[in-house]
Each structure stands twice: as structure tokens, then as C-alpha cells.
């Protein structure tokens, strides 16, 4: 990281998809990461309030992990929270994030990693990423720069409005909600459908080019119409 020129840092800050392509590529694996077109659009949207509702296997959790890593690596002293409905899901969120930086974790000093724990990642630049379950007693009172919420449709409105949102009051940081859809109510639904300030993204499973049409048809046969939609 310390070999990046100011010009390179500027380009990477302005375009997170470029960060994914250039800095999350593992030289020991088969090649450069290349986000899908819908991922690129979501990543490079600089708005601080975004909500993505996506089908299975669209990479919504991965997209949020990429944004968290982008902020963690390129800015100093950032406090970044990953939130999921349960502790197991929060661990899985952090596990997916770490899977994107396996080469960083193999050479922590080179990539500025100070400490890597099960639910927390700390950088030499003073930034950290913490994964937590959506329980008021575990997160109330923190001040953070960004929050990335996985499966937000399954988290109570009061946690999102009265606990997490105030954490961003003095930092004006990113607040990103991602989820598979679940009913026409709740905080995520309101932000997606009714709040013009939030930038919304809808991604169907069939938009992922790696999901074969055979799999889509199998889901169509096996699910109810509501489940498939």
C-alpha cells in the first residue's frame, strides 16, 4: 500500500471498482478480479446512502465487503461496522470480507494489516472493521464512519433508525443496506421504495452471468411464484 503514488490513491478513491480490480487481485491465483456491470455501477456510486435488494448469489455481501475494504485501505482512522442479523451471520460477513484479501493476510506487514481477529480487522493506518450482530446492547454508543448492513430486511427498524443511524450523525459516512427481499414493509423497503434521498439498486439472480439458465429454471419449478419473484 505504501508504494501507491498520490495520483494512484486519488484514482482508487474516486473509483472503488478500480480498487477491486487492482488491489484485490491475488497474484497467486488465476487472474484479475473484474466486477460485473451491476457491481461496478453500485461500487462507483459515491452517494453516502445506498440500498441494494438482490436475489441469491448476486454478490451483494461481497459488494459491501469491497466498499468496506476500499475505505479501510485508502483512508486513515476510519471506523467501519459490518452488521448482520445474528452473530453467525456477522461472522460470515467478516469471513467473506477476509476471503477477498487472502494475499493481504499472507503478508500482513506489506499490506498494512496490524491485527486480524475473527470479528475484527485493524490497519496500521488506524482504520478498523468490526463485524457485529444487530443487537442493541453490543453496538449502542459507538461513533463510526460507515455501516454496511447485510440482510437488512431481517433486522428490526429500531436498530437501524435509533441505534445505527445516530452513530453516523457527526461523520456523514456511508450507510449501505443490502438484503434479499422479504415482504413489503420495514426500513429497507421504505428506503428502497419511498425515500428519494437513497440510491436504490435491484439485482435479479439471473443478472449474474455465472448462474446458468438451467439453475434459474430449476428454481422456477421448485419455488412458489412469490418465492421465485
Image (cartoon, rainbow, N blue to C red):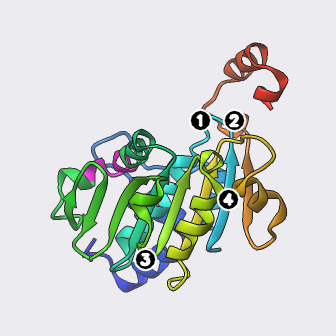
Q: Secondary structure at mark 2?
A: helix
In the displayed structure, would residue 156 be above or below residue 115? above
Q: Tags 1 and 2 in contact by the CB under 8 Å rule?
A: yes
Task: Indicate left or right for 78 with 126 as reference.
Answer: right
**Of the image marks 2 and 4, the number of the one nearer the N terminus:** 4
Q: CA distance from mark 1 to mark 3?
A: 32 Å
Q: Which residue is mark 4?
A: 51
Residue at the disc numbered 2: 205
> Which of the two residues, 41 or 91, is positioned nearer the viewer here?
91
Residue 101 shown in magenta: yes
Assess whether residue 130 is covered by the magenta stretch: no
- SS at circle 4: strand
Gap between marks 1 and 4 measured at Cα: 17 Å
Res. 43 visible in picture: no
Query: Picture quarter containing residue 15?
Result: bottom right
The mark nearer the N terminus, 1 or 2, is 1
Quadrant where the N terminus sits is bottom left
Amino acid at each position: 500500500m505504501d508504494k501507491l503514488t498520490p495520483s494512484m490513491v486519488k484514482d482508487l478513491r474516486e473509483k472503488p471498482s478500480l480498487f477491486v480490480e487492482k488491489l484485490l487481485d491475488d497474484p497467486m491465483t488465476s487472474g484479475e478480479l473484474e466486477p460485473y456491470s451491476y457491481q461496478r455501477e453500485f461500487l462507483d456510486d459515491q452517494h453516502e446512502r445506498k440500498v441494494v435488494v438482490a436475489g441469491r448469489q448476486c454478490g451483494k455481501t461481497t459488494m459491501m465487503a469491497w466498499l468496506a475494504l476500499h475505505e479501510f485501505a485508502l483512508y486513515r482512522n476510519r471506523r467501519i461496522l459490518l452488521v448482520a442479523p445474528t452473530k453467525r451471520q456477522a461472522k460470515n460477513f467478516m469471513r467473506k470480507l477476509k476471503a477477498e484479501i487472502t494475499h493481504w493476510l499472507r503478508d500482513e506487514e506489506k499490506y498494512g494489516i496490524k491485527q486480524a481477529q475473527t470479528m475484527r480487522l485493524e490497519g496500521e493506518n488506524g482504520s478498523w472493521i468490526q463485524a457485529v450482530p444487530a443487537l442493541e446492547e453490543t453496538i449502542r454508543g459507538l461513533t463510526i464512519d460507515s455501516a454496511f448492513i447485510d440482510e437488512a430486511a431481517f433486522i428490526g427498524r429500531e436498530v437501524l433508525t435509533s441505534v445505527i443511524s445516530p452513530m453516523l450523525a457527526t461523520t456523514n459516512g456511508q450507510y449501505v443496506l443490502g438484503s434479499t427481499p422479504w415482504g413489503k414493509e420495514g426500513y429497507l423497503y421504505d428506503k428502497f421504495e419511498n425515500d428519494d434521498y437513497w440510491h436504490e439498486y435491484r439485482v435479479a439472480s439471473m443478472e449474474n452471468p455465472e448462474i446458468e439458465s438451467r439453475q434459474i429454471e430449476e428454481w422456477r419449478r421448485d419455488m412458489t411464484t412469490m418465492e421465485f419473484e
